[in-house]
Image (spheres, helix red, strand yellow):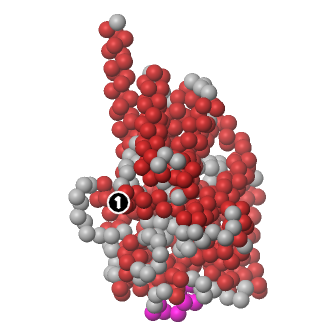
């Protein structure tokens, strides 16, 4: 089987330039895009044992979206891109597009090299140790209650207690929070409660229906914040925990999991379009119902504008602009943006450095609606060290991903699993689109805090038992 895979890979690699030469209008661009596709799918073959929520697997999915962006702009051009028309370029767009393809290719290949040098093959068997089920249940119920109380308070504050009105205005949620205040700090306890429930269910079977009802409720609460991507990633993190906790079962059904994620992707689009629809309803410009609105958005022009032109996948024009202008207009950052996330956690920290996404927005695109504009991981590495940032930086990034995965063998417990899943889902997976500013100590500090709480309560319960 391995020999067959090897011959398939070699035959494909040899035939690619021939196919591109005879069937492509622009050989350089099409060949570069084809090579990215080739190495992405070849990396799956190199994994030997496919682990769905391995860092490289998640990283690959967002890179596939980047390829879709390259293909789209190759076929359609840049006449509709506001990221092209709303700024000035020093170099020819066609040359920049070709450069961006090969810089992306180099960065991805260096990630693979770093990853496969370090990655180890091992059997996944997460050890779940629960000293006191009473402590877990106490924390789960307490966290859920505090989360629900926080949510009801927010609904009362912004919608007079009408939950339907509250969800209808989801598009302006961040605007409401900015103007009217209202903390959602206890929402985080709800997310932790779901994770703890999964650990408890692994050790002691509980009511799946009760768990699913609470999961749906917490999912709705997360969605009500208006952060669609973060909501989806929370759900993916729950699925990832389930996958690893019962890996021996789920590894037999990889294809079915892949199919379920196509359904999941459709659901994600509907969530995104509902948020857009709620915005149209809020400004009284809706000329159809939600079904009609979605039907319009799934037309080719509308769909590609929503998905690609607005930068919801790796933003290729932004990468082109960074290659064109960053060194001359901004100056290289020399690693500053790669460690800025640490200072974000420190109160009153005054590092004076904005993340690349905010610099791009303020300097090049101040008149475009919306927030910060992610530079793509490859763009961020270029913004720090130029082409050598892409070569060395992405190589080290591959090593970091593989090392994080390897630690599952050393720390095969539920607490490291929780940290690993959050790092993989919320950071590694989105780096092809994002930046290091997406990294946060909040991806693991809340779970360290929860672990400490459990240890304290375990001690208290054990002392009470001895006292009696």
Toward the viewer: 216 or 281?
281
In percent of width and height, residue 272 lies at 60, 61
Q: Residue at x 48, y 22 (%)?
A: 133
The residue under the point 58% across, 62% down is 278
Q: Is residue 118 above or below residue 450?
A: below
Q: Quadrant of the C terminus?
A: top left
Residue at point 68%, 36% (across, down): 249
Image height check: is 320 above or below 198?
below
Q: Is residue 58 visible?
A: yes
| Res. 307 visible in picture | no
User: Which residue lies most toward the top here?
Assistant: 468
Q: Please determine whether, in this image, residue 331 is positioned above or below residue 208.
A: below
Mark 1 element type: helix
- What residue did someone put label 1 on? 341
Q: Nearer the viewer, residue 188 or 256?
A: 188
Which residue is more in the foreground, 191 or 64? 191
Q: Main secondary structure of the magenta part?
A: helix
| Quadrant in which residue 301 is drawn | bottom right
Percent x, y of residue 345: 31, 54
Relative image position of residue 322 (x, y in whole percent): 44, 80
The magenta region covers 89-98
In the rendered view, does 339 fall on the left or right side of 292? left
Q: Residues within 10 Å of mark 1 (few under 14, many from 20)?
A: some
In the rendered image, residue 450 lying in the magenta stretch gets the answer no
Give the image location of residue 417, x and y in percent.
49, 41
Residue at horizontal 63 percent and vertical 81 percent from the top = 73
Q: Nearer the viewer, residue 298 or 48?
A: 298
The answer to whether residue 214 is left or right of residue 89 is right
């Amino acid at each position: 089987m391995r020999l067959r895979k090897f011959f398939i890979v070699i035959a494909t690699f040899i035939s690619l330039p021939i196919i591109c030469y005879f069937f492509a209008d622009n050989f350089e661009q099409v060949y570069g895009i084809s090579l990215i596709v080739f190495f992405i799918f070849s990396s799956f073959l190199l994994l030997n044992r496919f682990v769905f929520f391995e860092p490289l697997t998640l990283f690959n999915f967002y890179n596939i979206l980047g390829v879709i962006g390259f293909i789209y702009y190759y076929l359609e051009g840049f006449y509709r891109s506001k990221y092209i028309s709303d700024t000035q370029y020093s170099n020819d767009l066609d040359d920049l597009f070709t450069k961006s393809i090969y810089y992306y290719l180099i960065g991805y290949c260096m990630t693979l090299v770093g990853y496969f040098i370090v990655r180890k093959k091992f059997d996944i068997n997460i050890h779940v140790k629960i000293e006191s089920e009473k402590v877990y249940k106490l924390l789960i119920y307490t966290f859920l209650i505090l989360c629900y109380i926080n949510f009801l308070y927010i609904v009362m504050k912004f919608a007079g207690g009408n939950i339907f009105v509250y969800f209808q205005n989801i598009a302006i949620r961040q605007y409401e929070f900015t103007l009217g205040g209202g903390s959602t700090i206890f929402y985080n306890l709800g997310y932790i409660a779901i994770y703890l429930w999964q650990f408890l269910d692994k050790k002691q079977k509980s009511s799946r229906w009760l768990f699913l009802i609470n999961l749906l409720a917490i999912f709705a609460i997360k969605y009500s914040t208006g952060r669609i991507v973060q909501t989806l990633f929370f759900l993916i993190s729950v699925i990832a925990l389930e996958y690893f906790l019962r890996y021996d079962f789920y590894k037999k059904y990889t294809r079915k999991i892949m199919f379920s994620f196509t359904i999941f992707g459709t659901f994600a689009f509907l969530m995104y379009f509902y948020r857009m629809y709620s915005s149209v309803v809020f400004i009284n410009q809706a000329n159809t119902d939600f079904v009609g609105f979605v039907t319009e958005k799934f037309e080719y022009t509308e769909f590609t504008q929503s998905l690609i032109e607005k930068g919801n996948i790796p933003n290729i024009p932004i990468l082109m602009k960074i290659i064109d202008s960053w060194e001359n207009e901004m100056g290289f950052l020399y690693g500053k943006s790669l460690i800025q996330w640490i200072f974000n956690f420190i109160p009153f920290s005054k590092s004076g450095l904005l993340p690349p996404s905010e610099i791009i927005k303020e300097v090049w695109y101040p008149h475009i609606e919306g927030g910060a504009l992610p530079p793509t991981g490859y763009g961020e590495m270029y913004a720090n060290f130029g082409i050598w940032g892409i070569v060395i930086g992405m190589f080290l990034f591959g090593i970091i991903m593989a090392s994080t995965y390897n630690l599952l063998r050393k720390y095969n417990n539920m607490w490291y699993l929780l940290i690993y899943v959050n790092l993989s889902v919320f950071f590694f997976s989105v780096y092809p689109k994002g930046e290091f500013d997406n990294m946060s100590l909040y991806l693991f500090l809340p779970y360290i805090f929860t672990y400490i709480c459990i240890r304290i309560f375990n001690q208290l319960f054990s002392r009470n038992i001895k006292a009696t």
